[in-house]
Image: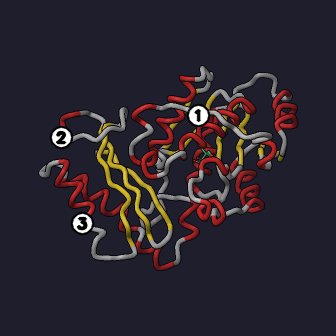
Amino acid sequence: MIVVETIKSLKQELEKYNSKNVGFVPTMGALHDGHISLVKRSVEENDVTVVSVFVNPTQFNDKADLERYPRTEEADKKLLEAAGCDIVFMPQVEEMYPEEDTRVFNFGSIETVMEGKYRPGHFNGVAQIVSKLFYAVEPTRSYFGEKDFQQVAIIRDMVKQLNIPVEIIACPIIREESGLARSSRNELLSAEERKKAALISQVLSKSVNFAKDMSVEEVKNWVNDQFKSDDTFKMDYYDIVDGNSLQSVSSWDESDYIVGCIAIYCGKIRLIDNIHY
Ligand code: PAF
């Protein structure tokens, strides 16, 4: 496995593979089993796998969140080597942003709901960095976790808008034993919070059973109620949406692809998860 820090050296390394299929997994590091499942899938499906590790400042609308984002570069390299990654791209901020990126994307209604509404500017920053990474890596396929459900929709739209010839592959959420969706942010939870955070996936799974007998509104209320008795939790939103348009649905027969998406604070840490109805 080779580690490179500049776009120039990344392209030099890639040239050695002579236009073979390139699989790409963009990450912000602090790698866990969720990321590793993406890397392994890329290794299986491509001739060469590139993983980027870059904590992208432009997608953080909260400075404190950027500062406390976990950074575990040496451990990341070991995990990537073991997973069969060929090239790790670990640029500095100046490499990716030699000057301010002033591009403003417009993703229409898929951007103004849920994460886009609660984290203004977040998806613009994601689109800025992922497009730059796609230009640098020129991947055949790129792999994203479904935990960031809305992010996958944004990336699909971005590559369409920019005519970037890459296949976007969404991979299933990987969970801890407790059911908690794997996230780099889980490392920031105290032991007690981490235990409590298992409630999130438990509530979502139970709500799928209730969907047979309850209206969409009732399920949303029920999910919200489950977190009210413990002030460790603070709900940002629980929305039940059409999985393509990401717009709220008001009845179960409105779409055959319905997803429940949650963003909730456990202590100071904001967690997201989703479930298919
Ligand atoms: O999902 C993430 O970790 C980030 O949003 C991504 C796609 C690596 C862009 O910085």
Measure the C-alpha gap from mark 3 to mark 2.
20 Å
Specify the amino acid type for callout 1. Val
Distance from Cα at disc 1 to Cα at disc 3: 38 Å
In the image: residue 113, left or right of residue 83: left
Q: Residue at x 19, y 40 (%)?
A: 252
Pointer 3 residue Cβ closer than 8 Å to ligand 1:
no
Q: Earlier in the sequence, mark 3 or mark 2?
A: 3
- Residue 113's spot in the image, x, y percent? 39, 43
Q: Are marks 1 and 3 in contact (CB under 8 Å)?
A: no
- Tag 3: amino acid: Asp
Residue 210 lies, with reference to residue 156, above or below; the image says below
In the picture of the structure, the residue carrying the numbered disc 1 is 104
x%, y% of residue 32?
Answer: 60, 58
Between 71 and 167, which is closer to the camera in this rendering?
71
> At label 2, which amino acid type do we have?
Ser
Camera-nearest residue between 154 and 252: 154
In the image, is 37 to the left or to the right of 56? left
Label 3: few (<14), some (14–19) or many (≥20) C-alpha neighbours in 10 Å: few
The secondary structure type at the circle numbered 1 is loop
